[in-house]
Every structure is written in C-alpha cells, then in structure tokens.
Image: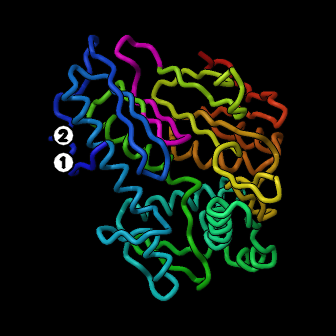
Amino acid sequence: MKRLICLLLCALLLGCTASSSAERYTASFLDVFDTASQLVIYADSQEEANRLAQWIYSELLRYHKLFDQYNDWPDVTGIYEVNQKAAAEPVPVEAELFEILAFAKEMYTLTGGRTNIAMGSVLRLWHQAREDGQTKPESAYLPDMMALQQAAKHMNAELLVLDETNQTVYFTDPALQLDVGAIAKGYAVERVAEQLEAEGIQGVLLSIGGNVRAVGMRPDGTAFPVGVQNPDLGAKKQHIAVMNLNNASLVTSGSYQRFYTVNGKQYHHIIDPATLMPATHMWAVSVVTEDSGLADALSTALFNLPVEEGRSLIDSIPDTEALWVNHDGSVIMSDGLPALLY
C-alpha cells in the first residue's frame, strides 16, 4: 500500500459512513509496527474505502514512529529520543506519547509489574540475540544471564517521572530504558478506533498483527466474526475459536510466531520480568474487551502469569474475558467468554 499524506480527519472521512448496502473492501500493509496488517472496510464505493484506508494507515504510521525505540524519526519526538535524553533532563513530548506512558504506568500497577515498559534494557539484550540468531542461525546464542540481571536493576517503572503540566518525561534512574512494545499496537489501534467512532464511522475492522479491533458492526447489523489463531500452525484447524466482535477488541499473545532457535530449542519474544526469560506458562492467550490498549497490556500480563493468577486478574476487570491455550492444545476460558463465541 502506498504511503500517503495525512489529511485532516474531517475532510478525509467525509461521506465514509457505510449504508446498509455497503460493499466489503480490504487493504493491507507490512510496514507499520513491523507486522502484517489488514483492514476490512464496509463502504459505498471503492473510492470511499480507499480514502478511509489511507487515513488509517497514515495515523498508524505516525504512532509507529512515536513508539519505535530502535530508530530515530526526525519528524517526531518519540521513544528513541526519550531514551537518549530523558536521564539528563525532562524531555517535552507530543501528547500521544505522554498519554501512552501515563497509560503504561497504570498498566504496570494493574498487572503487578507483569506488563512493564521500563524493561527496555533487558529487552534490548534479547532483541539483539534474536536478530543475531536469525541472521546466523548456526551461531545463535542466549543473552548472558549476568548481563540480564544487571539490566534488570534498572527496570523500575516508578522511576519514570511524568510531568503532566509541562508534558515532559524524565528518568530518575540514568540507566532506565523504555520499550512500549507490549502495549504499542493495541494503544495505537484504540486511538484510531476512537477517532473513527467520533466521526460516526461504522463497519471497520482493524487487524494489526495480533491486535484486532471492530469499529461498530457490519452493515447488516451483525458482529464481525474474528478467529483466534491456532498456535499449532501446522494443524488443519486454523482457529481455536471464533469470536463475535461488536465495538470490541481481540488481542492475542503467543510463543508461536516471533522466536529464534538456540541448540534446537525455540525462544520467543515475550520476556517474563520475574525470570528474565521467555515465559513458559502457556502456548497463547487471548483477551477480549472494548479497549484494544487494555487488551494488549492484559494479554502480555496473562502470558507472564500462571493461568489461575491470570483468571483472578481477568475476573477483577469488568467486561473483560480471556482464552488460554495450553502447550497440549487444550483450551481454558474465563466464565463470560463462551457467550462471545460465534
């Protein structure tokens, strides 16, 4: 999909509210949040669908730049620049970045530290090892545990200081580093969905990697059916379950896609802050709730928790359900999830 100029929302979306006779259109791209993305848009014409897809793409690309910790984008003050400067002095940031950091601190508290954006120093060691292992599989290695433990001394999210009045970010620990990967996609998707809803747009499904958000229903008044990926990618059955999404999000975290192999064993990308190693409690976990950012944060936390502790967390949050897939393929559902099945 072509990169397109971001226009004003009101101008771009004018006339895009789908009628009951709207047709189904799709768009896809690969360069936002380093993942495969697909949009399903119900619109009255290809032109309207294209216009809406262009705006969604440009907004997601803007969030991608803001939340990218590995690359410096000159047109934004993002996580990369904050990581470079915030230990020396408070760094003024754009509203969207300030807001995700404030949200992340809330999620850190809610999940008992299991979703922690201050793990940047630890995650960078794993990121480098994974990239090296994928480039040269014959010499793949694990990060040194002593280096991980040293990095883990600097992942206290309470040492991230947010000044709401001046909209600045400051690190009281000079070695602290941020990585918002555990919540970035979901948070960005939710912000885009909110803007669509504010404009009265319905009949849109955003699927950004493992983050799916339905904006309204389909034109015939039915919910969007969305499959939960079977983590056994070689199985004939592609989906573990199919969910009905109506103004709701489905976010999945799992060990079956982003990984590398060391001495014949796979090591995935979701690192448990308690062990500093990839979490091993389950194969995958999916969360269904309205807010995609919340669902993203919770799916990471649940993946880092034993099932019973995860159930207690889910039960404490209204209108939120979860589905766990054990390593043997068996499925566990929270009490309210069966009512959402297609």
In terms of depth relative to the viewer, which is nearer, 34 or 62? Answer: 34
Q: Colour scheme in the image? A: rainbow
In the figure, 280 relative to 173: above or below?
above
Please say whether residue 157 is visible from this viewpoint.
no
Q: Is residue 220 magenta?
A: yes
307 vs 52, left or right, is right
Residue 170 place in picture, x, y as percent: 50, 79
Amino acid beneath label 2: Leu
Amino acid beneath label 1: Leu
Residues shaded magenta? 206-223
Q: Secondary structure at mark 2?
A: helix
Q: Residue at x 64, y 50 (%)?
A: 258
Q: Quadrant of residue 146?
A: bottom right
> Circle 1 sits on which residue?
8
In the figure, 318 relative to 69: above or below?
above
In the figure, 92 relative to 115: above or below?
below
Q: Residue at x 44, y 44 (%)?
A: 189
Q: Are marks 1 and 2 in contact (CB under 8 Å)?
A: yes
Separation (CA) of disc 1 from disc 2: 6 Å
- Screen quadrant of the C terminus: top right
Q: Quadrant of residue 55?
A: top left
Residue 252 place in picture, x, y as percent: 62, 39
Residue 318 place in picture, x, y as percent: 62, 35
Q: Residue at x 43, y 65 (%)?
A: 98
> Circle 2 sits on which residue?
12
Q: Secondary structure at mark 1?
A: loop
In the figure, 99 relative to 128: above or below?
above
In terms of depth relative to the viewer, which is nearer, 186 or 163? Answer: 186
Residue 41 place in picture, x, y as percent: 34, 27
